[in-house]
Amino acid sequence: MPTNTMQNRHILEFLPSLHRSLIELVSAMNQPERDAAMLEAAGLKLERALFPLLVAIERLGPIGVGNLAGGVGRDHTTVSRQVARLEALGLVQRQAGAVDRRVREAVITRQGKLATDAVDRARERMALELFKDWSAEEFDALVRLTRRLAEGMRGGPAPAAPDSDDA
C-alpha cells in the first residue's frame, strides 16, 4: 500500500494534467455552439441564455432566484429578468416559497417539462455518439469518479478510498 507521501507526490505530479483536462471540459461545455446544437437537436426555439436556467429549474425546483443565480454563477438581477422571460414563455411559473412565503420560487410548467424532456432526448442522442467507442467499464468508471469528484468539491460525504485492486 503506498504511503501518504508517495500518494501526495503522485497527485502533485498529475494535478496539472487533471486541471488542464477540467478546464478543457468546462470550456467545451460552456461553448455557445454546444447549447445551440442541443436546442436545435431538441427542436426548441429558446434564447441560449435561458436554456441552462430552464434545465436547472426543472432539475432543482422549486428554487428561489438567489439560489438559482448562485448555482449558475450569474447576477441575481439578471437571473430574475431571465426567469421572468421564461415565465412569459409559459415554461416556468413563480409561486410563494413553501418554507418562506415571502420568497418567490420558480417551478417548471407542463410546457417547460416537455421542453426539458426534448433536451434530455437530444442529450441522450449526443451522448450515445460521444461514448460509442467506450467500453461499459470505462463509462462506469467515468460516472463513478466524476460523481466522487463532484461530491468532494461540494463538500459532500467523503468518498471511500478505492481498494488496491480497483486503483
Image: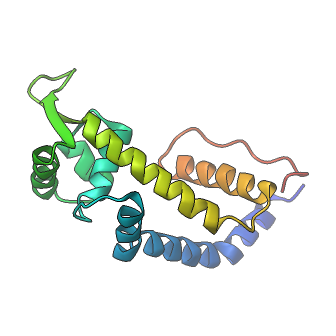
- Image position of 31 with respect to 110: above or below: below
- Image position of 46 with respect to 80: above or below: below
- Most foreground residue, 41 or 35: 41
Q: How many tags in the picture?
A: 0
Q: Quadrant of residue 128?
A: bottom right
- Image position of 1 with respect to 15: above or below: above
Looking at the image, which residue is at 9% across and 54% down? 81
**Colour theme:** rainbow
Q: Quadrant of residue 31?
A: bottom left
Looking at the image, which residue is at 15% across and 53% down? 76
Q: Is residue 134 left or right of residue 35?
A: right
- Most foreground residue, 57 or 162: 57
Looking at the image, which residue is at 75% across and 70% down? 10
Q: Position of residue 7 (x, y in %)?
A: 77, 63
Q: Is residue 68 left or right of residue 165?
A: left
- Residue 126 appears anywhere in the view: yes
Q: Is residue 49 left or right of residue 87?
A: right
Q: Position of residue 3 (x, y in %)?
A: 83, 59
- Most foreground residue, 86 or 43: 43
Quadrant of the frame with the N terminus: bottom right
Q: Is residue 130 left or right of residue 65?
A: right
Looking at the image, which residue is at 66% across and 43% down? 159
Q: Position of residue 44 (x, y in %)?
A: 30, 58
Q: Position of residue 67 (x, y in %)?
A: 25, 43
Quadrant of the frame with the C terminus: bottom right
- Residue 104 appears anywhere in the view: no
- Image position of 110 with respect to 139: above or below: above
